[in-house]
Image (cartoon, rainbow, N blue to C red):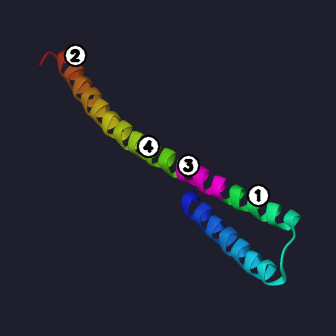
Amino acid sequence: MLSNFVRATNDATTAALNRFVSVVSGVGCSRKMTARIAELEDQAEQARIRAAKFEKDRTKLQIEIRDLSVELEAVNTTAASLSLSLSLCAYGF
């Protein structure tokens, strides 16, 4: 869900930046404006890189959670089995 938000934000930022560039380039832009555009493009690229890293981390964590859930289920099954064995031993079976 976070990745969808970040992706949508990046897409919106890129679209706004592209609209701005097309308007400014039609007017003719100064060196200062060109430098600012380059800076904003760099910031947008950095945001895309961070979003990709967050997505990768999220995927790794989801896999880890799934693996831990499987392990927990196995431990609970073993605990139930041991509990039953202890109960049977307590009653002499």
Q: Give the labeled residue for mark 2.
A: 90
Q: Secondary structure at mark 3?
A: helix
Spot occupied by residue 28 in the image (x, y as percentages of width and height): 83, 79
User: Range of the magenta residues?
Assistant: 45-52
* Amino acid type indicated by mark 1: Glu
**Residue 6 highlighted magenta (yes or no):** no
Q: Quadrant of the N terminus?
A: bottom right
Spot occupied by residue 33 in the image (x, y as percentages of width and height): 85, 67
Q: Nearer the viewer, residue 50 or 31?
A: 31
Q: Give the labeled residue for mark 4.
A: 60
Spot occupied by residue 84 in the image (x, y as percentages of width and height): 22, 26
* Camera-nearest label, 2 or 4: 4
Q: Secondary structure at mark 4?
A: helix
Q: Earlier in the sequence, mark 3 or mark 2?
A: 3
* Camera-nearest label, 1 or 2: 1
Tell me the distance, in whole angstroms, between the alpha carbons under discs 1 and 3. 22 Å
Q: Are marks 4 and 3 in contact (CB under 8 Å)?
A: no
Give the residue displayed 35% in from the left and 34% down from the top: 72
Q: Give the labeled residue for mark 3.
A: 54
